[in-house]
Image (cartoon, rainbow, N blue to C red):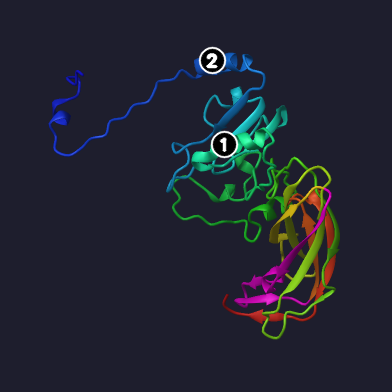
Amino acid sequence: RDWSWIPCALRHCIGGVRLGCCEKIDPAAAVDEAIELAKSVDVPIIIAGLNADYETEAVDRHDLELPPGINDLIWRIIVNQSGCPVTMPWANQVSTLVHAWFGGQETGNAIADVLFGRYNPSGRLSVTFPRRLEDTPSFLSFGKGVRQMYYGEGVFIGHRYYEKLGNDPLCYFGTGLSYTTFEYSNLRVPEIVDLGDDGEQTFKVAVDVTTVDRDGYEIVQLYVSDVECDTIRPRKELKAFVKVWVPKGKKMKAEISLDKYAVSYWDEEEEIWLAEKGSFKAIISRSANPKDEVLQREFELGRDLYWRGV
């Protein structure tokens, strides 16, 4: 081969050198080409998302948008791959939306198994997807050139913030679909909870889960609401979850063990953990969306409990 085009300094330097290049793409032409290709198939599946150019350590993103031109491509079935929320202005226009995160070298096989029905999906979102950047809890806390940030949302972080403000996000924390539907019944919670003198006793919450369509895993999410708290608290907080295998036509028991942290909060003035005597509510919900709450039952904490440390 003719290597004369490589500068002499590189050809004769000691050690190694790594050269790289990337294809120059005309975004408009690439979109037109993709549209024509999609017209030639029965079902177009768009794989979109972010890569290391957009998501990396030690750098904050400036927005939640997908790369330029991507939104113009999306219709029918979309598989999004990103490690964080992105805005999806087309969400109500597509028939199928799969958020696949970054699944490694077997991502393609895993996505195909889900899309073709070979595997019944059961994943749930571990974060909230806002409709726009301005809806996020920390939006007002960031400024240009400011090196120290103060998060003004206080205890209303994550899903707690959206419920407090009545802000309807694109996808709630805990959201996820399956090829089957699950029904809940018979929520069991102790009427009175006693954590013991040392606060180390636990208590159990149980609920029955059934399905009639096909076998599948269900993620049972248990939220707790402090009904009589003397300080400002979120309406509900996720305290535990359990993954339950539910065979078709069977009823399975999901059992969750809770400890003192499920009914306590940090008292800033006294600098102490506090579990206040009074009424609490156990809530089984399909996600953090108030509309997804399916069962709830109140219980009483019999006495106050204080402690320091973890």
Specify the segment rendered in magenta: 249-277
Residue on which disc 1 sits:
109
Residue at image position (84%, 49%) is 249
**How many callouts does the rendering have?**
2
For the N terminus, the image quarter is top left
SS class, disc 2: helix
Rendered location of residue 42, percent (x, y): 67, 18
Q: Is residue 261 above or below residue 248?
A: below
Task: From the image, state whether disc 1 or disc 2 is nearer to you.
Answer: 1
Q: Is residue 275 among the parts visible in the rendering?
A: yes
Residue at image position (79%, 49%) is 292
Q: Is residue 112 above or below residue 76?
A: below
Snapshot quadrant of residue 64? top right
| Among numbered discs 1 and 2, the one appearing first in the sequence | 2
SS class, disc 1: helix
As drawn, is 124 to the left or to the right of 55?
Answer: right
Rendered location of residue 299, percent (x, y): 83, 71
Residue on which disc 2 sits:
33
Q: Answer whether residue 266 is magenta in the image.
A: yes
Residue at the right extreme?
186
Residue at image position (69%, 36%) is 117
Q: Is residue 62 among the parts visible in the rendering?
A: no
